[in-house]
């Protein structure tokens, strides 16, 4: 049976998660066409983007509205001046040989 699917890859939809599957993913339906959505719970009303469409079902991921998406991208921007990593000090050879000789004599 070859029929027109009610959704296409890339579609953005508002759905209500009707139940959860055996692996814990959410299940939504559009015209009885099943959409699997990870990281949601039964009863959640979410905006999703369809990432893959198969013959009998599709997969989607939760996306925010345009304002939320802009805020998320701003938060993920790297900081201009990141805090430097703390590195343990190691013994570094001294460039001045006189200082090295003096230290060696002091150790003897």
Image (cartoon, rainbow, N blue to C red):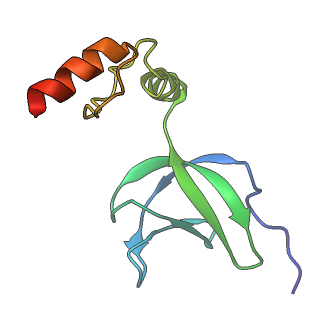
Q: Is 58 displayed left or right of 26 in the figure?
A: right
Residue at point 34% right, 22% down? 84
Rendered location of residue 55, percent (x, y): 77, 78
Rendered location of residue 3, percent (x, y): 86, 75
Residue at point 34% right, 28% down? 92
State the image quarter where residue 57 is shown.
bottom right
Rendered location of residue 79, percent (x, y): 43, 17
Q: Is 100 displayed left or right of 14 in the figure?
A: left
Q: In this view, does 38 lie above or below 10?
A: below
The residue nearer to you, when weighing 95 against 9, is: 95
Q: Quadrant of the N terminus?
A: bottom right
Rendered location of residue 74, percent (x, y): 47, 20
Q: Is 83 displayed left or right of 48 in the figure?
A: left
Q: Is residue 96 above or below residue 36?
A: above
Q: In which quarter of the image is the C terminus?
A: top left
The residue nearer to you, when weighing 65 against 100, is: 100
The residue nearer to you, when weighing 107 against 7, is: 107
């Amino acid at each position: 049976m070859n029929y027109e699917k009610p959704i296409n890859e890339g579609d953005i939809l508002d759905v209500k998660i009707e139940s959860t599957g055996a692996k814990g993913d959410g299940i939504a339906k559009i015209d009885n066409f099943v959409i699997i959505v990870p990281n949601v719970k039964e009863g959640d009303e979410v905006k999703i983007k369809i990432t893959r469409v198969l013959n009998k079902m599709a997969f989607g991921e939760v996306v925010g509205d345009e304002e939320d998406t802009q805020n998320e991208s701003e938060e993920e921007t790297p900081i201009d001046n990141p805090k430097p990593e703390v590195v343990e000090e190691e013994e570094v050879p001294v460039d001045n040989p006189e200082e090295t000789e003096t230290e060696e004599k002091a150790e003897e």
